Amino acid sequence: MIARAVGHFGSCAEYLHNTVTHLEGMGIRDNYLWRLQQLVSDEIKVLHPKPGD
């Protein structure tokens, strides 16, 4: 659902990515959020394959 959800201010995937990267920038690494980020990224690649993939 995160890979597909979009609201007025952008997608949930963008929000998740911004959250994990900003936390990382503050020295906070949450492996569960990074795993979720990877799963969402993988799902987006399935939903929107690049030509030639």
Image (tube, rainbow, N blue to C red):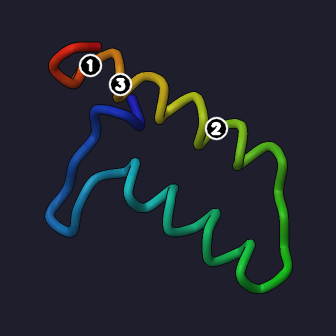
Query: Mark 1 highlights which residue?
Result: 47
Q: Label 2 to label 3, Cα distance in Å? A: 14 Å
Query: Mark 3 highlights which residue?
Result: 45
21 versus 51 height, above or below? below
Q: Quadrant of residue 46?
A: top left
Q: Label 2 to label 1, Cα distance in Å? A: 16 Å
Using the image as rendered, state which of residue 43 and residue 12 is in the foreground: 43
**Disc 1 secondary structure class:** helix
Q: Label 3 to label 1, Cα distance in Å? A: 5 Å
The reply to whether discs 3 and 1 touch (Cβ–Cβ < 8 Å) is yes
Question: What's the residue type where badge 2 is placed?
Answer: Leu
**Disc 3 secondary structure class:** helix
Measuring 71% from the left and 74% from the top, which residue is drawn there? 23
The reply to whether discs 2 and 1 touch (Cβ–Cβ < 8 Å) is no
Quarter that holds the N terminus: top left
Question: What's the residue type where badge 1 is placed?
Answer: Leu
Measuring 24% from the left and 20% from the top, which residue is drawn there? 49
Q: Is residue 53 left or right of residue 39?
A: left
The x and y percentages for residue 25 are 71, 81
Q: In the rendering, which numbered label is found on residue 36?
A: 2
Q: Is residue 31 left or right of residue 41?
A: right
Measuring 28% from the left and 40% from the top, which residue is drawn there? 5
Question: What's the residue type where badge 3 is placed?
Answer: Lys
